[in-house]
Image: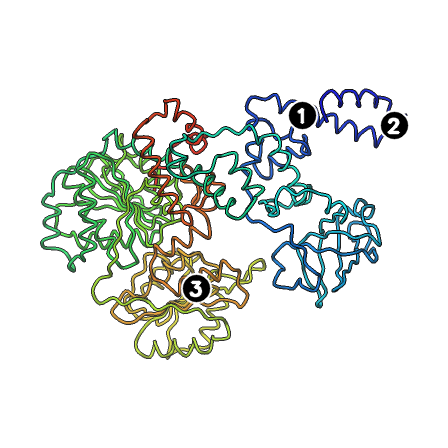
Amino acid sequence: MSLRSAFTTFGFALDRRRLGIAKFRKLRFRFVSALGFHYLCTMADILESSVKYVPGVGEARARLLEKELGVFTVGDLLRHYPFRYIDRTKIYPIDRIDESMASSLVQFRARVTGVAYAGEGRRQRFSAFVSDATGSAELTWFHGIKWIEKSVEVGREYIVFGRPSFYRGQLSVIHPELEMVEKALNRTARSGMQGIYPSTEKIASALGTKGFYRIMCNAWTLARERIPDPMPAAVRSRYDLMPLAEAVGNVHFPQSPALLARAQRRLKFDELLGVQLSVQAQRSERLSRRNGFLFPRVGELFNDFFGHRLPFPLTEAQKRVIREIRQDTVTGFQMNRLLQGDVGSGKTMVALMSMLLAVDNGFQACMMAPTEILARQHFATISRMTQGMPLHVAILTGASKTAERRHALEGIASGEVDILIGTHALIEDNVRFSNLGYVVIDEQHRFGVEQRARLWTKNNRPPHILVMTATPIPRTLAMTLYGDLDVSVIDELPPGRRPIKTYHYTDAARLKLWGFLRQQIALGRQVYVVYPLIKESESMDYKDLEDGFESIIRDFPLPQYRVTVCHGKMKPQDKEESMRQFKEHEADILVATSVIEVGVDVPNATVMVIESAERFGLSQLHQLRGRVGRGGEQSYCILMSGDKLSRESRARLRAMCETNDGFRLAELDLRLRGAGDINGTQQSGESFDLKIANPTLDAELLQTARQAAEEILAADPQLESAEYRPLRELRARHAAGRKFDFSMIS
């Protein structure tokens, strides 16, 4: 309706008594929609206009879209891409729909043969019985019954669209969408492939699939001729990119699978290029400052340790990593490096030798670990290996006694302490270093982004940063793909170590498992049994330690078998005593929670049993597995789970059985959980910046976008020219709203 005709029609409708309330409201809605349409058509930048002006949205639905989906503007709506597609031209006979389609949306053509009501009040439901020449089905609604019963006519034929389910072999569809066959046949489809959009329960209830699709059609009608393309023609030509407006149209209303693939490639490229323009500019700025501390000397501490105190020869991988770190610290740039290596590969030795480089050059170093157990293990190991050297090592944890705390704080402030080892206590405000130049963060995945960032403020210039992990968190892995984090990998195990064999069993194999544990104990080996919970939980159906401990005591009786227990709620002295018993082989089985995930080194332990393994994430599973395999004997990891597993849980457990490579596991974790926000503090989940691209699945395209960004920034670093100025919006969209540049925190 045009604006003029809307005014005319509405003028005749002012007498509500003559027209009736229902018709008056309908005409008023058409008038307001026409006003909104006219307003949008006069806007210079339609993509920045409020979504409320899109026909079919309005104030109430706009608030819902803002709250539920973060859609504020027409541009936001058009950047809300489908996550999959269905073929709306395909209509199934009822007898061809089976239980394998239960997770899909299907449509079929059927005639209503009867209706029925059941229940009362809020529990009332309305059912329509339909059939075609091949079979019958039941359609059921629990909400909006008054509206549905008016639109369902017995004897009429409809196109039914919804998710099938089956009860006793009978096809049933809950809250389907109905369209009269006559109307469906006369409708001109924009595309045979209809997008299915990410949604929420409230959005689905208010709009449904058809309603959301209709709104998207209206938004596209408004914007299709007015979408600017920020990509320079030369870049589009070089990388064979579809024009932006054509890509937006084909991603929402694909004209063919080939055009959909090209549209997705263009939109992914734009997102990844925006990320690259931001990250590469930040990286260039960081490196251009040349404010990294210089470690030019390889001094007495390093040479003495390397020449006379190494407990075992370094592997070639360890030597390579030390050379990479050494190169970083003589360039004048601030180092930002990830050290990835499986548990037991020698990361701690590399960390110690690189800290000695810092001390040789007049700087202090610190090492932050996630738990008291691991921090004190590092302190004991480093103190023992450097005993007799002119090196002062101290420890600071949340449980440090007053004298120990005072000694550490005063020592680092005065410069007397060369290396400080600790937990989260290192980031407290009262921890002030004299000249901190080097930071090591162990088990990096156990710290929050902001926690790691706090260590950057412990000197007037940021220190060199080395983060270590066996399983990089998805956010860090994404940063290595984006190119703002250098990576070193220790891909060798020390001589004599054997790869751990990992198996997945359910409760049906428990007797077989107990027999295997008895065999290992008879050989003089020790066993971990780890539970996700201490006590039974009403909300989570997982194995718990208390019940498991009683079961193990019953099946492994004294005096033949010795069992001890360790969990986070025990008193520190009791926990230490349990660990001592296991380390000194006064116990054969340690029943524990994930408190032993890090910091426990018992070379004689050869079996790790993880109960309810589906409860744990990949990094936890890999860390727990790393508690065994630390001696020369063959070691095993047994993953126990229930029979019913989600697709994601099954994928995690299968990956654990297939590989011991922490980086490969991290890549799977990235695919399953998402990359997190590399400019923010979210460590996993969908990236705030990416709506359609995936940094691992689209790794090749990401590298292409990175190459394009480097070429663009080399030609125009500030994006000031007329050719490249439109790309500022892509870069700004990635970096908007950040108070602190967390992209430099690995």
Residue 92 visible in the shown view: yes
Residue 722: image location, x then y, percent:
39, 22
Find residue 36 and name its label: 1
For mark 2, give the secondary structure: helix
Q: Which residue lies furthest to the right in this view?
A: 18
Mark 2 residue crowding within 10 angstroms, few (<14) / some (14–19) / many (20+): few
Q: Which residue is drawn at 41% across and 63% down?
A: 592
Q: Which scheme is used to colour this image of the protein?
A: rainbow
Q: Distance between the residues labelled 2 and 1?
A: 24 Å
In terms of secondary structure, where does tag 3 sit? helix
- Looking at the image, can residue 404 be seen? no
Image position of 728 with respect to 109: above or below: above
User: Which of the image's four quarters has the C terminus?
Assistant: top left
Mark 1 or 3: in front is 1
- Secondary structure under the numbered disc 1 in the rendered image: helix
Label 3 neighbourhood size at 10 Å, few (<14), some (14-19), many (20+)? some
Residue underneath mark 3: 654
Q: What residue type is labelled 1?
A: Gly
Q: Vertically, is 119 above or below 67?
A: below
Q: Which residue is drawn at 62% across and 25% down?
A: 40
Q: Which of marks 3 and 2 is in front?
A: 2
Query: What number is the disc on residue 207?
Result: none
Q: Quadrant of residue 216?
A: top right
x and y percentages locating residue 599 in the rendered image: 32, 57
The three-letter amino acid code for the residue at tag 3 is Arg
Q: Earlier in the sequence, mark 1 or mark 3?
A: 1
Q: Do the residues labelled 3 and 2 touch (CB within 8 Å)?
A: no
Residue 19: give its label: 2
Circle 2: residue type: Leu
Q: Which residue is drawn at 69% across and 63% down?
A: 166
Q: In this image, 108 relative to 692: left or right?
A: right
